[in-house]
Amino acid sequence: MPFTDQLRATRAKINWDQVYKTASSIKGQPCTSNNDEFSGGCNIIYRILFEDGTSWALRVPHDMAPVEPTVTTMNYVKNTVPTIPIATVHAWSDSENGDGVGTPYILLDWIEGSTLTWNATFPPPETREKVLAQLAQYSADMLVRTTDMTKSSTSTRSALAWTLRRIDSRLRRIFNGDLPSFDPIDCLIYRAMAEEKYHILSLDTLPFPLMHTDLNPRNILVDGNFNITGILDWDDWVCRLPLQFAVRCPAMIALDDDPSADDLFLKDRLSFIEHFASSLHFSGLLDDIAAQLLPIAADEEQQAFHSAIGSKGSYAYWVEKYLVRRADWFNAAAGTLDRFLQANPEMAGSPEVMSIQTHLLNFRESHLGTYWECNPALCRLFENVVY
């Protein structure tokens, strides 16, 4: 269904009498709506007004998506990390008719504020630092408080296993032809480097903190003095990450291939890291863990690798800037393909996989110039091979 038709259909389902009845029964006073509508990527938001001037928000998913996971996350963060400005949930329903409202919904506090504007020219430097200091504090609080990082503890989950599962998902799509613009050998080298270069063994079995991975301006509300009044979008972009992946700059200042913004965003990242380090210092985090996390935050290549796990665009950026097309990594790709097939045996008979296996085997057996001449794709791929 086209998006505009979907919005129209969602609006038509809302039983406003039941909305007012539900809100009034909780608040204890009459309410109405001013009919203002705010449409985000996944939800429609309406403002509910009470007699005492209080406002709530009615949040309705476009596609009847379940709201319970979002409510659970918001309640957990509200109780566990009280420093983060997040709306209180007053009522919700996942039933198809919303317990009479007509659709799944959430009733929650209305957060005053304006969507943050953030680009290469605005806000000015001192304001940028103020915003980044607040985000650094929230990130440190999430990292420490959603796991017990103030004492020695371990997880039954492995960061490396988590990483390889996600890379393997991309590899399967590449081999199946769903990502034709991505070179399978590039991704195999990426997998090999994940195992041999980027993985931090000492952090592998530490608990996975809950992190907000989409701190973009549209998800940040501020007042006139750039105090953050609300963090939005606690849906799909909030997840538990391995500790080394949880140390990340906000998406709005993450690595970018835009030269016009790169210098300023680099300054932003350095400012964020400085404030993040200060926040960790006072967080109660074990010193030996903090000492390992800060270099990760400052390592541009490591940050690019982390971002590439969950984003095709970030992966393309990593390939362009950091992929090492060298003979030793080409051989490592052959080894990691074997391990990929052990974890994904159903892919072993794929013609695409068998073709790559042949290329890798030939490379292992011979570096003859005629081989490269007969394989222009490999010649292009390894034009900078060092022996």
Image: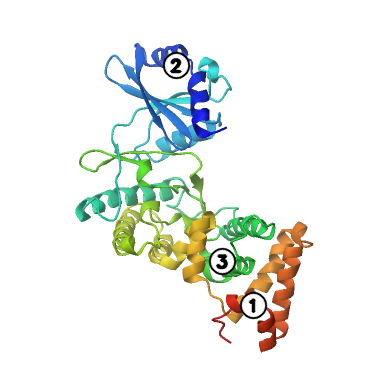
Q: Characterize the local packing of mark 3: few (<14), some (14-19) or many (20 or more) Cα atoms within 10 angstroms.
A: some
Question: What residue lies at 48% left-to-right and 15% top-to-bottom?
Answer: 15
Q: Are the residues at dot 1 and dot 3 in contact (C-beta closer than 8 Å)?
A: no
Q: CA distance from mark 1 to mark 3?
A: 27 Å
Q: Helix, strand, or loop for circle 2?
A: helix
Q: Which residue is mark 1?
A: 376
Residue at image mark 2: 19
Residue occupying the point 46% across, 63% down: 304
The span from disc 2 to disc 3 (Cα, nearest Å) is 50 Å
State which mark lies toward you, 1 or 2.
Answer: 1
Residue 102 x/y as whole percent:
53, 18
In this view, 211 is above or below 291: above
Q: Position of residue 82 (x, y in %)?
A: 36, 38
Question: Foreground: 139 or 228?
Answer: 228
- Tell me: residue 190, above or below residue 327: above
Q: Label 1 sits on what residue type? A: Pro
Pinpoint residue 69: horizontal percent, then vertical percent.
53, 35
Q: Residues within 10 Å of mark 1 (few under 14, many from 20)?
A: few
Amino acid type at image mark 3: Ala
Please tell me whether mark 1 sits on a helix, a strand or a loop. Answer: helix
The numbered disc on residue 235 is none
Q: Amino acid at mark 2?
A: Val
Q: Position of residue 41 (x, y in %)?
A: 46, 38
Which of discs 2 and 3 lies nearer the camera? The answer is 2
Neighbour class for label 2 at 10 Å: few (<14), some, many (≥20)?
Answer: many
The answer to whether residue 324 is seen in the rendering is: yes
